[in-house]
Image (cartoon, rainbow, N blue to C red):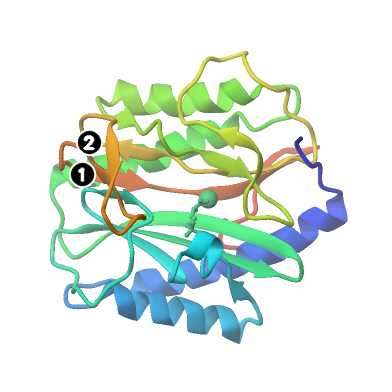
Amino acid sequence: MVILKLPQEIEKMRVANQIVARILKELEGHVKPGVTTGELDRLAEKLANKEGARAAFKGYMGYPYSLCTSVNSEVVHGMPSERALNEGDILSLDFGVSYRGFFGDAAVTVAVGEISQKARRLMEVTKSSLSEGIAKAKAGNRLGDISAAVQSEVEQAGFSVVRDFVGHGIGRSMHEDPQIPNYGVKGRGIELKEGMVFAIEPMVNEDGYKVRILADGWTVVTEDGKLSAHFEHTVAITANGPEILSLLK
Ligand code: MF3
Ligand code: CO
């Protein structure tokens, strides 16, 4: 069941997602060679608490950190550690908060120092695939229109979309219906309605789409060991089209 949000609820989600956006921006500014993902995790939690928000991932299904930090061939749910970032790495920062009863969720992939052309292009295509998907988040469209737009942008560039993890509805829970795959068929799936709020989150692999989960039970990596990138926004379907609640104002 997809829960529709009233304008006053979307306003609360705007506030929660602006907290996420501010924190991701601040974290991005700290990403450089030598910094550890554990330091970023602790900073994320501290910043959330300073805003009066709760870091939403911590404790979720037993996840022990506030932030997901996925480096290079890590796709999503990378666990922060005392390992330092290296020049040339790409790092996905995925962060969520709950604030006054509503959740915000967003992710970005950032470069650590100078990165390869190939890594740069992977990041750019992943980001543009998210934009293409968001553009279809309009009342009257179908869920498959979002999925197909993401997939087509990715595959045109010669990359692949991860199948095993998907985006999701979001609201008073971090994960609500519907699931939002990053692959699909235009015109299929549920009809989109004003008041739906979605976390759309393409995970894009440089080569094969297959992934596996490491022995830590969380870290998702590409099966072929090649690079992966991830971007996520929380988006409300309004009378005026899609509004990206997690885009920094
Ligand atoms: N953005 C991810 C998601 O929506 C992050 C969840 S990480 C977890 O599923 F630790 F909270 F599971
Ligand atoms: Co999410």
The residue identified by callout 1 is: 227
- Label 2 CB less than 8 angstroms from ligand 1: no
Q: Indicate left or right for 239 with 120 as reference.
A: right
Look at 54% across and 63% down and name the residue there: 60
Answer above or below: position of 241 versus 72.
above
Q: Depth check: 83 or 202 in front?
A: 83
Nearer-N-terminus badge (1/2): 2
Q: Amino acid at mark 1?
A: Leu
The image shows residue 16, relative to residue 10, as above or below, that is: below
Left or right of 38? Residue 98 is right
Q: Residue at x 33, y 59 (%)?
A: 78
In the image, residue 173 above or below residue 199: below
Q: Is label 1 in contact with label 2 (beta carbons under 8 Å)?
A: yes
Q: CA distance from mark 1 to mark 2?
A: 5 Å
- Residue 227, x across and y down, in percent: 21, 44
Q: Residues within 10 Å of mark 1 (few under 14, many from 20)?
A: many
Give me the residue at 52% from left, 26% from top. 147
Q: Secondary structure at mark 1?
A: loop
Residue wearing tag 2: 206
Could you tell me if residue 30 is visible in this image?
no
Q: Amino acid at mark 2?
A: Glu
Q: Which mark is residue 240?
A: none
**Residue pictured at 42% horizontal, 25% vertical:** 151
Q: Is residue 98 left or right of residue 172?
A: left
Residue 202 appearing in the image:
yes
153 displayed left or right of 232: left
Of the 4 image quadrants, the one containing the C terminus is bottom right
Q: Secondary structure at mark 2?
A: loop
Q: Decide: is 190 above or below 106.
A: above
Q: Closer to the camera, 153 or 209?
A: 209
The spot of residue 1 in percent (x, y) is 76, 35
